[in-house]
Amino acid sequence: DTAVSQTPKYLVTQMGNDKSIKCEQNLGHDTMYWYKQDSKKFLKIMFSYNNKELIINETVPNRFSPKSPDKAHLNLHINSLELGDSAVYFCASSQVHRGVSEAFFGQGTRLTVV
Amino acid sequence: QKEVEQDPGPLSVPEGAIVSLNCTYSNSAFQYFMWYRQYSRKGPELLMYTYSSGNKEDGRFTAQVDKSSKYISLFIRDSQPSDSATYLCAMVLEGAQKLVFGQGTRLTINP
């Protein structure tokens, strides 16, 4: 059973389109995250939700909008896609009482904007 | 200056060698220190974590934290080709929810 699963795994789309990435975790964790990994492998946090509540919102363009329908799901919607949005997006989850010392990551969604 | 600095490599060593991977950081308030391993086209997976200063050993892996120098290390003994991956250090402030990552070091173990 996959602990943190993301769909789709690959996404190729044209500039200006709107797309969504879905994430689900079956670990029973309270906190979920979206991270972005650029072409140089640098991983940076975008958002964090705890029990469906947004707790971290880094400096991310407002074209990116996360949504958490329940604590097991965290989706990422991106409007008006730009070339610079091309990256690998990782979903992760962790238990609140342990901080983030045991964050589990999904396989990633490789987004290519053409 | 990035909060966490890590030499991106690439680093290539022969099988059986001892590997040393390092990160430096600027924020002395970091309390949790982690090492993640990321295989090509996969998500990062947690290898080890330590709280505050000290050493921690797990099999062939040893993590060291020197808070006075703001320096952390991961040692891999008897390295294997299956250890070939990108290794990312990460750190967290006490009570915070976000991981701050280094850039990752790409490691290749040659048979």
Image (spheres, rainbow, N blue to C red):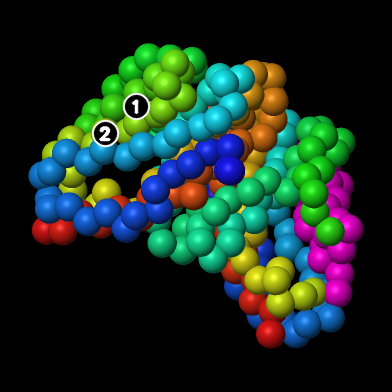
Q: Is residue B64 above or below residue B101?
A: above
Residue identifier under label 2 = B75
Residue beneath the point at 58% across and 61% down: A38
Secondary structure category for the residue under label 1 = strand
Residue type for callout 1: Ala
Residue A15 sits in quarter: bottom right
Residue beneath the point at 36% across and 37% down: B22
Provide residue B87's location: percent of width, then percent of height. Answer: 39, 46
- Give the residues drawn in magenta, as a range: A62-80
For residue B104: magenta? Answer: no
Q: Chain of mark 2?
A: B
**Residues at discs 2 and 1 in contact (Cβ within 8 Å):** yes
Residue type for callout 2: Phe
Identify the mark at residue B63; answer none if there is no mark: 1
Q: Nearer the viewer, residue A56 or B11?
A: B11
- Residue A77 showing in the rendered view: yes
Identify the mark at residue A73; answer none if there is no mark: none
Left/right placement of residue A88 relative to residue B78 reads: right
**Callouts 2 and 1 on one subunit:** yes
